[in-house]
Every structure is written in structure tokens, then in C-alpha cells.
Image (cartoon, rainbow, N blue to C red):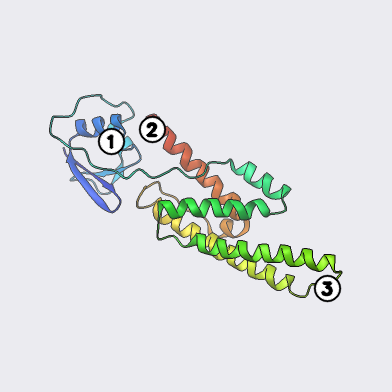
Amino acid sequence: MNYFISRDGQEYGPYSLGDLQRYVASGQILLTDLARSEGMAEPMPVSQIIGTIPVPIQAPQGFVAPAMPDYPDPPNLHWGLVLLFAILSYGLFSAVWNLVLSAWMKKVKPQSAAIYFYIAATGVLVIVFFTSFALSLNHTKDAYSGVLNLVYGILSLIGRFSLRSSLEDHYNSDEPMGLSLSGVMTFFFGTTYIQYHLNDIVRRKNQARMGLY
């Protein structure tokens, strides 16, 4: 029976069971990649087809394995530390970490627009900080900080949901890992919630590389 591998919107193959085992052993196909064959109602992960024990058989000469994109892993700071640093810094760490996550997302998926909203939000936050500092030195009442903080919150929220959309798109197509992020949890827990799922993705990818997933 022959199988086809789906990656980045394209199908590669056909490959025999022995071919799949060789490419998993060499790291060119992940156990989390989806595969299908004639007679299968839906694609399933390669791990369910070949098991977790690769067979190191040398590929025939002149045969070229499919070129699978190698995407960088997400930033893997533990979500608990992200939450702790955010609390200790009164939210400033979250603003910085949002930029880190969105910059990584831009490399993985160039169409992602999250980084632009986070840059704009950070710019507003900087204005709030320096304006409040200058006014406090002059003992002047700040009439605009409330409006600026509202703008910062709105831009951050738009960036957060833009990042969520890019993550779900990428990890359900380019790297099919079945990622689904709750809108409610994204709204209320934001960066910490997203980082929790990114930690899980890194864990699963590491397990796949070691043949444990």
C-alpha cells in the first residue's frame, strides 16, 4: 500500500511503508505529519501508521526524499515564568514577550500582522510612561493617560487575536498539530495562555524528533 504525505498545502509521494520508516528515521518526515492512502476516510498521523520504531534501511540510490520545510520552534520560556515576570514587572514583561512571540511568528508565517499591532501598542506604552514621568515632575494633572491606556489595551488585544489566528492557521496547515485556542481564554489570559500552548507544541515536537510521539 502506498501513502501520501501532506505538508505546506502540498502532497508528497507515493511512498511505501518502508519509505515512511526510512524518512522518519532520517528526520525528513515527522511522526506528526499527516498521511493518507487509498481506502482511508481521513488522513492520520504517520505515527499511527508506522508505530514509533523506525527501520534504518538505506534509501535506493538516485531517490530524492521530499524537501520538508524546517520551521523554528516557538520561544519556549515556561508559561509560569511568563506569568511571574509579568506580575513582578507590572505587565511590562508581557509587552516585551508579545514582541518576541510576534517576531517569531513573522519568521514562521510572513503573512502574520500581529507584530505591527504589538509594536504600535509598545509605542503607546512608551508615550504613557514618559508623559506620566514628565507630568509627575511638574506636579501637573495627567488628562490623557486614561485615553492612552485604552488605546494600548485595544492595540494589544487586536495583536493578541491576530497572533492567535496566525498560530491556528500555521499549526493546522503548515505544521498540522491540531492547535485550537479558546477565544475566551485568549481574551482573559492572553500571553500566558498562548505560551502554555507553545510550550506544549515544543514538547510534542521534541518527542517526535526522539521517536517518542
Is residue 204 rendered to the left or right of residue 47? right
Spatial separation of the CA atoms under disc 3 and disc 2: 58 Å
Kindly identify which residue carries mark 2: 209
Q: Residue 188 at x, y = what percent?
A: 62, 58
**What kind of element bears circle 2?**
helix
Mark 3–mark 2 CB contact (< 8 Å) = no
Q: Amino acid at mark 3?
A: Lys
Q: Residue at x 20, y 33 (%)?
A: 19
Q: How many marks?
A: 3
Is residue 115 rendered to the left or right of residue 153? left
State the mark number for residue 49.
Answer: 1
Task: State whether residue 117 is above or below residue 105.
Answer: below
Q: Quadrant of the C terminus?
A: top left
Q: Residue 182 at x, y = what percent?
A: 52, 56
Is residue 12 rendered to the left or right of residue 195? left
Q: Residue at x 29, y 38 (%)?
A: 29
Spatial separation of the CA atoms under disc 1 and disc 3: 68 Å
**What kind of element bears circle 1?**
helix
Kindly identify which residue carries mark 3: 141
